[in-house]
Image (spheres, coloured by chain):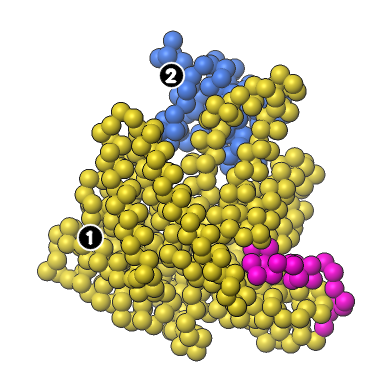
Chain colours: A blue, B yellow
């Protein structure tokens, strides 16, 4: 699932295939990850996995790795 | 009352500090009451006739906060709260703009309730965060009133989130280091405002409102307005942060060298940071999570491919966002144009790899855009945008006035430009561990204080530009 999420990340942020995505990446680290693409990313994830991502939960998430962990946990709990 | 006034620095603040740090008063409750009383006095000094609005707003949002925590129909209560807050805000914004249009000053004069844009947004964030479950409601009315009226941030921000400050309302300690660092920030802000912003502001306004006969003078005027605007607003924010620190509160920084931005988008992440984050959390997030937005993506994805669908939806959201940011500053045509201008530029930047991938070009592009944006911002009374046009259409390349202004004000201009970039940070990193650092730091800060006082005395009263909003 982590790989699948990385692919969504690459797709929404229009990153090259050779760009290596690491878990410590945070909004602002790369030009492509601005507030609008962040919203697109959240929409795509919530749509793909049929989960709702609350503002409260997002407050504590600092980087891509944490967001992935949150999504994996959420999909496991919801299913 | 203005932070950079003698009455604030030598009467209001010393009395407030004497009472606050009085060894007899140790209980935090009494310290809070002292801060609340002084905050109300501070507000009344400049806006007594509008006190009822802020009092009503505090009672309203305090009550909504309590009710939100108890009822089931949370959405309805929140919607009601948001509508009432925005209605009051809009009424006074429109009335303020109409009154301002009738005055003879070149800039937007101070009309309407002081700081309404800031305390309304602060209170909206409070009730929305309670609805979202991010924060608990404040049950003590006086503590809530202190959160809203706390004088360092009341009139021109930064917009302080309740979640960042509520623990400090109940429990805070002021150490010597807090006071030292707070005083340093206060003096730096004072220097920025009284020495740089006020001095260059007079020159900038004389160019802005006078007859322009050369490109060089026009661009000099625009650059001076940029310097004045940054030093004025960031100076106020530094003072707010410093005062907060002295009283044991930590207010987040509101500026991060905006003219050092690598893109226009980056500039808005560095300028008035608290406002940008507010729009991000309370406007962008709800829009992008709304059913309409989701439906829009769904429909566009059917017609075009997903990539185009996202781009189209982002354009629409960006347009709404920038129109609101523009009009937040005032219901006037120049603010509408300002919003449209940044919408176009940021859309272009987001989709133009040519600019994005070249760092030097991107920085130059950003500075030019911001210069034009600042001129549009200040063209409140210049309906025909005469000054803006003079940047691009002029008779001469250079004139004598340009040389005269440069020879008279070059020191301020050099200092103004130099310290708009993180030079101090680099110097500090080099000498931080040297033995003489502390003495040098004290001498520099004390000298800045004395110079600021001298400028306040010779320049007289000068309100902050952002008081208008």
Q: Is residue B139 visible?
A: yes
User: Mark 1: few, some, or many residues within 10 Å (few <14, many ≥20)?
Assistant: many
> For this view, does B45 lie left or right of residue B297?
left
Chain ID at mark 1: B
Quarter occupied by residue B327:
bottom right
User: Which residue, as the protein is rendered here, is positioned at the far bottom?
Assistant: B458
Quarter occupied by residue B376:
bottom right
Alpha carbon distance from label 1 to label 2: 42 Å
Percent of width and height locating residue B409:
66, 83
| Above or below, B305 relative to B19 | above
| Above or below, B290 relative to B83 | above
> Which label lies toward us, 1 or 2?
1
* Residue A73, disc: 2
Q: Is label 1 in contact with label 2 (beta carbons under 8 Å)?
A: no
Circles 1 and 2 on the same chain: no
* Residue B32, disc: 1
In the image, what residue occupies the spot 38% across and 34% down?
B76
> For this view, does A68 lie left or right of residue B217?
left
Q: Is residue B260 visible?
A: no
- Front residue (pair B167, B32): B32
| Above or below, A22 relative to B428 | above
| Above or below, B251 relative to B77 | below
Does the segment drawn in magenta span residue B258?
Answer: no
Percent of width and height locating residue B370:
68, 59
Percent of width and height locating residue B251:
39, 56
Chain ID at mark 2: A
> For this view, does B129 lie left or right of residue B340?
left
Predominant SS of the magenta segment: loop
**Helix or strand or loop: what does disc 1 sit on?**
helix
Q: Which residues are magenta?
A: B375-399
In the image, what residue occupies the spot 26% across and 72% down?
B17
């Amino acid at each position: 699932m982590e790989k699948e999420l990385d692919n969504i990340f690459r797709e929404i942020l229009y990153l090259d295939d050779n760009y290596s995505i690491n878990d410590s990446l945070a909004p602002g680290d790369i030009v492509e990850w601005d507030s609008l693409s962040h919203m697109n990313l959240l929409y795509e994830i919530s749509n793909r996995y049929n989960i709702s991502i609350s503002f409260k939960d997002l407050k504590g998430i600092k980087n891509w790795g944490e967001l992935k962990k949150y999504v994996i946990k959420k999909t496991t709990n919801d299913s | 009352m203005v932070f950079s006034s003698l009455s604030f620095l030598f009467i209001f603040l010393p009395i407030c500090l004497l009472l606050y740090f009085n060894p007899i008063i140790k209980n935090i409750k009494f310290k809070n009451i002292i801060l609340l009383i002084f905050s109300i006095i501070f507000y009344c000094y400049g806006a007594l006739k509008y006190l009822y609005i802020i009092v009503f707003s505090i009672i309203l949002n305090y009550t909504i906060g309590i009710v939100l925590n108890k009822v089931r129909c949370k959405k309805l209560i929140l919607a009601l709260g948001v509508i009432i807050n925005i209605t009051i805000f809009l009424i006074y914004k429109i009335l303020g703009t109409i009154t301002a249009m009738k005055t003879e000053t070149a800039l937007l004069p101070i009309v309407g309730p002081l700081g309404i844009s800031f305390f309304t947004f602060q209170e909206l964030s409070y009730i929305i965060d309670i609805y979202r479950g991010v924060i608990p409601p404040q049950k003590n009315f006086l503590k809530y009133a202190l959160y809203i009226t706390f004088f360092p941030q009341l009139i021109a921000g930064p917009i302080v989130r309740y979640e960042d400050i509520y623990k400090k309302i109940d429990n805070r300690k002021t150490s010597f280091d807090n006071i030292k660092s707070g005083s340093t920030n206060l003096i730096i802000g004072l220097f920025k405002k009284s020495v740089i912003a006020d001095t260059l502001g007079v020159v900038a306004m004389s160019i802005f409102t006078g007859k322009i006969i050369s490109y060089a003078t026009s661009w000099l005027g625009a650059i001076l307005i940029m310097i004045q605007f940054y030093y004025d607003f960031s100076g106020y924010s530094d003072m707010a942060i410093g005062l907060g620190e002295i009283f044991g509160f930590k207010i987040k920084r509101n500026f991060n060298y905006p003219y050092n931005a690598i893109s226009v988008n980056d500039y808005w992440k560095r300028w008035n940071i608290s406002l940008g984050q507010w729009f991000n959390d309370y406007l962008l997030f709800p829009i992008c999570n709304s059913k309409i937005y989701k439906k829009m993506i769904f429909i566009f994805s059917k017609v075009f491919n997903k990539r185009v669908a996202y781009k189209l939806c982002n354009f629409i959201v960006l347009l709404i966002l920038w129109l609101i940011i523009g009009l937040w500053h005032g219901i006037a045509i120049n603010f509408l144009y300002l919003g449209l201008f940044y919408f176009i530029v940021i859309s272009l930047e987001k989709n133009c790899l040519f600019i994005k991938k070249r760092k030097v070009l991107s920085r130059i592009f950003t500075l030019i855009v911001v210069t034009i944006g600042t001129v549009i911002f200040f063209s409140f009374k210049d309906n025909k945008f005469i000054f803006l046009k003079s940047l691009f259409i002029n008779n001469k390349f250079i004139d004598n006035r340009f040389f005269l202004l440069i020879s008279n004000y070059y020191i301020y201009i050099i200092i103004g430009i130099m310290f708009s970039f993180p030079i101090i940070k680099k110097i500090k990193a080099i000498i931080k561990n040297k033995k003489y650092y502390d003495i040098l730091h004290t001498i520099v800060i004390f000298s800045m204080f004395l110079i600021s006082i001298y400028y306040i005395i010779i320049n007289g009263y000068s309100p902050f530009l952002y008081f208008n909003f």
